[in-house]
Every structure is written in structure tokens, then in C-alpha cells.
Image (tube, rainbow, N blue to C red):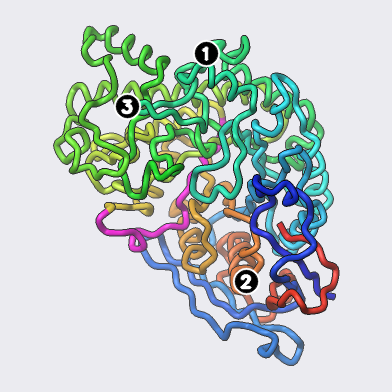
């Protein structure tokens, strides 16, 4: 019997409280059946293109005599020395409702069953600070997450949990809005300097400024103490699952859960790709730290603020005095400022991971930290967009090795994005090099002796993106990625060729580089594939709402 799923892209419509309930009517259904999609992926090395050659687009009229569409395999140009790379899939941002419950449990159950059948290792979910501790300090509600973890366990899957101390909303792919806890927003309204601020005085409520990490500004507790108490509460509630079902704790350390400054905020059109962004060091706590650092080396004038000639969010490096080819980024002042700015970020990461290690060490669950793949202007000398985000990476300095060593200190995995991107896909004027950036990060993690895991930065369903991930996931030294987490589970993922590509991708990542082509019959693999899309008036079977 086929499994038919209804679909919706996002669980929460904040303007319509009825959207928190399971809807009875959706635009279409997806039928999973014992069929084989006709597609062919090819992975090459990271400097080459990944190809897709399609057979016929499969539909109800293209089945073979056995009622199946033939599956043609993925050919991968790797040797047999690479390790298996487990694949996880990110759950929707609004997997837990504003009321703290698991959203559409029937839909989630069906979706997890589909992912298990496809060979996926597990899923990733955001444990939103703004949902769990919204009722007041130290008042935690983990009920929705507990239901999810139990469901994941029943399906024989694993789960990666992100300690998400940031706001959801205003960035790429954000389909809903989950602000920081109301009581935290109340403190911010009293003291706006608690959040990151740019040189124009624009406040960013995505994440608490690291400048006040060690100051008791949240009703008698420091931000790091608040984060620590939150993680300890999670540990105590889910102790029996840690290391078994919950295999990884990703520690959120900035906007989007990434260790960085919010230098390129998309909300209200503030920043647009490929702008250089702006430094976020103008709240009173960051200004005080900069002043003290400048005075400590006898350069009081350097502590008055960030670079005056660093331009605006949407400018290019050559439009500014600071970031241009021979700009002040490479002067004595520039080096001082960038060392301080990036150093504060490293200190924040160190504090957060130290707290997490003290809680989760010995549980069997791995720790990880996520680093943003800021690939635009990477070919320019100054690497302007990386600098404003807090990564002191230039033509003359490796900014990722210090981060890797900090993560290594705590035994944490280096999680990196933009694994799916190719240089040739980017606009020439933006001086992008996602492939060069990934190569640099690989080298940094190898030097620091830590594991590297990956994610795709943008939602992609095409075989070219999957092929690029396959290329970047393999290592010439015989050591691939620790894991890959695919962004993200939604309606489109379960549609037609998109599902076909995911299934092929997961299988290839699990072949350990030894089996380079799937057989057409795939007799030993999964029999769970998308057959076709039915219109909503088609007779349905086993209807459930799709995540």
C-alpha cells in the first residue's frame, strides 16, 4: 500500500492562530511507493562540476512491467579509503509550536518513517530558547521535545539537538518568527545595549551581545550562566537519551546558531548579497572592551570605536578605505582592531563550549559548533565579509585555524556550511569562492586534529548540489566528513525528483566510497521512493499532514 502524505511548508502562521492546528485541506499529496526513480548523479572532485543526467521524468505512465521506475546509480570518482558519512535531515524551524507542543505529530511520524526508509541516519532540531524558557527565568517546558525524541527513537533514528539561543526570523530560510524569551526582551527594552549594535546605532535583537557575557544583566545572572542553566535543564530532562538517541549537541553561539557577529542582517532590507556587512561593536559593553584593549597597549585613540572608513552594509571592498586592496585593514591599527574583534568572538565560543563540556562530557553525546560559510569577497585580499562577521581571515592570515583550535580544546566538531556550492555558480563581481573556503577549512581542521561536519547553506534539491556535497565530503587523506546535515525537511523535499535525488545521495554517502554505482534493481537498498504527485481530489490512503 502506498503512503500518502499531505503537505505544508511551515507549521506556524503568527497572524492566524488557527494554523497551529492540523489543517484538513492541502494543495496536494505525495505518494510513496515501492518504485525506483530514474536519475543519475555523478560526483567529481571539488574543483570539477557535478553532473546530472536524467532519464525520463517518471510519472504514472512510465512504470516498467513490475510497477517500478528503474533506478540508475550514482557514479562517484573516489577511491575506497573514505569513511561512511551519515546523513541527517533538519526538521522544520517550527517543529515545536508556540505553545510548546509537537506540531502535527501524525505528520511528523509519517515523515520520520519515510526518512528512515530512505536510509537517513537521523534528524536535527532547534531547541529554541524563546520557546522553552519563555514563561520566565528557569521555567522550562521541554514537553514537545520529549514527544519528538520518543518518536525519533521509535523509528530507530538518531537526533542532533541545537541549543538555539538566537532569534528565528529575518535570515535566509526563516519561515517563522520565534523571538528571544519575553522576559529577556523586557530586559533589552530597559537596556538596549544588551544586543549587538552597528555604527549607526541600529540594534539587532537576534542574539545577546557577547560584550556582556560575564555581566549579570539578565535578572541577576550573566548570559553565559543563563545558557548554562538552560543546557543543564536539557541534560537533566533527556539524560537517558544522551549518547544513544541524542548523538550530538550543537551549541548555538550567535545569530543562526553560528559563531559570528550579525554583520549581514537581512531583516528590513538592511543587507543584501554580496554586501560586505558592518562591524557590530558599538554597544556600550563592546565599546568599553575596545577602549580598555587600546589603552592597554598605549594607543588610547584606537579605542574610540570601530574603523571610520569601513563603509556600509551593501558596499564592495573597493568602495571603502578600510577594505580596499591596500586598505587600512593591513595597517597597525587595522591589525589591532581585527585581533580584538575576532578575539572577542573566540573568547565567547570558548566560554560557551566550556560550559557545554562541563554538562555533557561523559554522556556519549558529541559537542559541535557551527561556523558560517561566508564565501563572498573571499578572493579579495581583505576578505571583507568574513572580517565583519568576526573571522580574521585575509590573504595573509588564516582565520579558521584559531577557531578550529578553540573547538579542538573542547573536543567539539567543526560544523561548516556552504558544502553544496560551486565557484562557477556565483556572480563574478562578488569574488566568491565557496570551494576555496571549504578547502581552507578542511586544512584548518586537519591541522587542529578535529572532526569536520557539513551542511548546505541554502535549500537545494538539484543533483548538482548533491554531487558537490559528495565531492567535498571526501578527503584526499582518506578521512571524510564526520556527518552531513541536509537543510531542510519540507514539502518540496518529498516531491518527485527531489526525493529521488535525496535517496541516491544518502545511499552514496553510506557506501564508504567502495561501491561507485547502484544497481538498477537496487535489490539490497530501500524500496521507499516518491512515485508521483497526486492532485488533492485523488482518492487518498493513510492521510497525514506532511511537515
Kindly identify the residue that appears in the image at 68 percent across and 24 percent down.
Answer: 230
Residue 247 counted in the magenta span: no
| Residue 190 point in image, percent of width and height | 53, 16
- What residue span does the magenta drawing correspond to? 411-429
Using the rendered image of the protein, determine whether residue 1 is visible from the camera's viewpoint. Answer: yes
Q: Is residue 541 positioned above or below 244 on the image?
A: below
* Marks 1/2: CA–CA distance: 49 Å
* Secondary structure under the numbered disc 3 in the rendered image: loop
- How many neighbours does mark 1 have within 10 angstroms: few (below 14), some (14-19), or many (20 or more)? some
Q: Name the residue under label 2.
A: 500
* Quadrant of the drawing holding the N terminus: bottom right
Res 124 visible: no
Q: Which of marks 3 and 1 is nearer the N terminus?
A: 3
Q: Determine which residue is flagged by label 3.
A: 199
Mark 2: give few (<14), some (14-19) or many (20+) Cα within 10 Å: many
Q: Which of marks 2 and 3 is nearer the N terminus?
A: 3
Question: Dividing the picture into quarters, in which one does residue 330 lie?
Answer: top left
> Which residue is found at the position 51% from the left and 17% from the top?
213
Q: Position of residue 318 (x, y in %)?
A: 18, 43
Q: Is residue 411 left or right of residue 284?
A: right
In magenta segment, residue 427: yes
* Image: 143 above or below 351: below
Q: Is disc 3 surrounded by few (<14), some (14 to 19) or many (20+) residues within 10 Å? A: some
The quarter of the displayed image where residue 216 is located: top right
Q: Mark 1 points at which residue?
A: 214
* Left or right: 68 as drawn, with respect to 204: right
Q: In this view, does 99 lie above or below 291?
A: below
For the residues bearing labels 2 and 3, Cβ distance under 8 angstroms: no
Eye-nearest disc, 3 or 1: 3
The quadrant of the picture occupied by the C terminus is bottom right
Assign a secondary structure to mark 2. Answer: helix
Amino acid at each position: 500500500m502506498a503512503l500518502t502524505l499531505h503537505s505544508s511548508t511551515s507549521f506556524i502562521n503568527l497572524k492566524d492562530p488557527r494554523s497551529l492546528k492540523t489543517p484538513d485541506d492541502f494543495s496536494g499529496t505525495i505518494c510513496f511507493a515501492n518504485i525506483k526513480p530514474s536519475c543519475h548523479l555523478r560526483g567529481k572532485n571539488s574543483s570539477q562540476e557535478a553532473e546530472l543526467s536524467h532519464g525520463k521524468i517518471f510519472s504514472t505512465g512510465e512504470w516498467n512491467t513490475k510497477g517500478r521506475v528503474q533506478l540508475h546509480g550514482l557514479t562517484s570518482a573516489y577511491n575506497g579509503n573514505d569513511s561512511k558519512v551519515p546523513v541527517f535531515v533538519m526538521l522544520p524551524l517550527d517543529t515545536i509550536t508556540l505553545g510548546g507542543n509537537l506540531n502535527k505529530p501524525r505528520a511528523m511520524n509519517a515523515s520520520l518513517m519515510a526518512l528512515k526508509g530512505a536510509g537517513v541516519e537521523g534528524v536535527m532540531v532547534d531547541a529554541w530558547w524563546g520557546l522553552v524558557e519563555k514563561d520566565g527565568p528557569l521555567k522550562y517546558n521541554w514537553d514537545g521535545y520529549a514527544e519528538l525524541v520518543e518518536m525519533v527513537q521509535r523509528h530507530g533514528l538518531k537526533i542532533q539537538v541545537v541549543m538555539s539561543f538566537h532569534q528565528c526570523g529575518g535570515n535566509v530560510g526563516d519561515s517563522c518568527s520565534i523571538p528571544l524569551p519575553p522576559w529577556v526582551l523586557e530586559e533589552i527594552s530597559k537596556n538596549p545595549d544588551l544586543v549587538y549594535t552597528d555604527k549607526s546605532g541600529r540594534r539587532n535583537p537576534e542574539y545577546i551581545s557577547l560584550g556582556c557575557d560575564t555581566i549579570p544583566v539578565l535578572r541577576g545572572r550573566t548570559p553565559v550562566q543563563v545558557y548554562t542553566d538552560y543546557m543543564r535543564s536539557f541534560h537533566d530532562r533527556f539524560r537517558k537519551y544522551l549518547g544513544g538517541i541524542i548523538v550530538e549537541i550543537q551549541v548555538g553561539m550567535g545569530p543562526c546558531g553560528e559563531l559570528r557577529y550579525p554583520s549581514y542582517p537581512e531583516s528590513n532590507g538592511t543587507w543584501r548579497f554580496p554586501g560586505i556587512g558592518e562591524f557590530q561593536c558599538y554597544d556600550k559593553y563592546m565599546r568599553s572592551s575596545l577602549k580598555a584593549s587600546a589603552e592597554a597597549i598605549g594607543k588610547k585613540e584606537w579605542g574610540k570605536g570601530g574603523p571610520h572608513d569601513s563603509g556600509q552594509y551593501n558596499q564592495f571592498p573597493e568602495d571603502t578605505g578600510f577594505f580596499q586592496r591596500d586598505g587600512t585593514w593591513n595597517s597597525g591599527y587595522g591589525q589591532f582592531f581585527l585581533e580584538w574583534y575576532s578575539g572577542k568572538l573566540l573568547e565567547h565560543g570558548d566560554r560557551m563550549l566550556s560550559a557545554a563540556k562541563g554538562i555533557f562530557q561523559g554522556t556519549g553525546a558529541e559537542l559541535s559548533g557551527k561556523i558560517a560559510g561566508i564565501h563572498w569577497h573571499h578572493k579579495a585580499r581583505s576578505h571583507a565579509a568574513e572580517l565583519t562577521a568576526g573571522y580574521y581571515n585575509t590573504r595573509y592570515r588564516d582565520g579558521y585555524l584559531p577557531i578550529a583550535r578553540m573547538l579542538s580544546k573542547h573536543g567539539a566538531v567543526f560544523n561548516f556550511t556552504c558544502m553544496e556550492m560551486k565557484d562557477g555558480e556565483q556572480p563574478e563581481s562578488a569574488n566568491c569562492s565557496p570551494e576555496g573556503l571549504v578547502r581552507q577549512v578542511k586544512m584548518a581542521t586537519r591541522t587542529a586534529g578535529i572532526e569536520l561536519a557539513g551542511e548546505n547553506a541554502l535549500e537545494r534539491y538539484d543533483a548538482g548540489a548533491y554531487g558537490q556535497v559528495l565531492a567535498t565530503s571526501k578527503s584526499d587523506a582518506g578521512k571524510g566528513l564526520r556527518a552531513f546535515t541536509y537543510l531542510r525537511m519540507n514539502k518540496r523535499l518529498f516531491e518527485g525528483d527531489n526525493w529521488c535525488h535525496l535517496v541516491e545521495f544518502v545511499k552514496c554517502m553510506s557506501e564508504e566510497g567502495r561501491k561507485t554505482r547502484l544497481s538498477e534493481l537496487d535489490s539490497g537498498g530501500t524500496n521507499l521512493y516518491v512515485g508521483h504527485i497526486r492532485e488533492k481530489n485523488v482518492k487518498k490512503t493513510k492521510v497525514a499532514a506532511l511537515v
